[in-house]
Image (cartoon, rainbow, N blue to C red):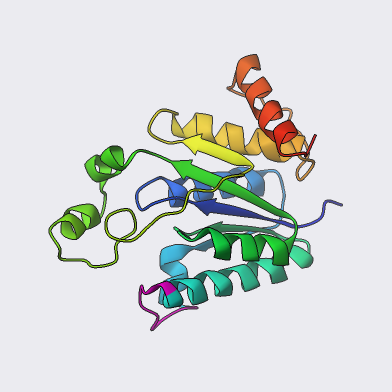
Amino acid sequence: MKKGFTLWFTGMSGSGKSTLAELVEKELLERGLNVEILDGDVIRTNLSKGLGFSQEDRDINIRRVGFVCNLLTRNGAIAIAACISPYKAIRDENRAMIGRFVEVYCQAPIEKLIERDPKGLYKKALAGEIKGFTGIDDPYEEPEKAEIVVNTAEETIEESVQKILRTLELMGHIDASDAQTEYSEEEEEEIKKRLADLGYI
């Protein structure tokens, strides 16, 4: 029986975290695995209601998500978190607490995010209507050693999902699937190189 682990999606608003997290959850459930997803918006409505968007409140929110992920992980579940989690120190704090922690950095240039802007938040932030908005007047600290980096401006959603699943397989967190995958040998080597550089294989 496989041990639990946390799959932590980080990236700026509109970078595809929630979309990818839900699709990866669906794939893992279809493989018969025990998965729980914690989405940033849902967490703020329930677990972190009343918190604002100051750095202190953001840190409290992300620590709470990490605490729940740790409980799930140590009880054999796969915890999937999809939160902006802009500050590296708190992500690293959660990594140290949880241990079996896989970081997925959803990367996209700010121009693409502004263009995509599903909730109209960047336009409001640029107009000064929202203060402390990540990537506009509040920093986003990019992960330096994320196990998985998906470029959601260039990759298709399916390519990103396959990259995530294949990395989890190579790390031994999930069993390899018999299903036909849609990535090339070159992409496979890229995944292996990243994991080798990080000391996993």
The residue stretch that appears in magenta:
47-55
Residue at x 74% of width, y 56% of height: 100
Q: Is residue 192 visible?
A: yes
- Does the stretch in magenta take in 50? yes
- Residue 32 location, x and y as percent? 72, 48
The image quadrant that residue 97 belongs to is bottom right
Give the farthest residue toward the top: 185
Give the farthest residue toward the bottom: 50
Q: Is residue 37 visible?
A: no
Foreground residue among 60 and 116: 60
Foreground residue among 182 and 70: 70
Residue at x 26% of width, y 49% of height: 118
Residue 193, above or below 19: above
Residue at x 45% of width, y 52% of height: 18
Foreground residue among 21 and 191: 191
Foreground residue among 186 and 127: 127
Split into 4 quadrants, where in the image is the C terminus?
top right
Residue 68, above or below 99: below
- Residue 38 location, x and y as percent? 54, 63
- Residue 164 location, x and y as percent? 61, 38
Q: Is residue 198 left or right of residue 123?
A: right
Residue at x 44% of width, y 58% of height: 84
Give the farthest residue toward the right: 1
The image quadrant that residue 134 belongs to is bottom left
Q: Is residue 119 left or right of residue 45?
A: left
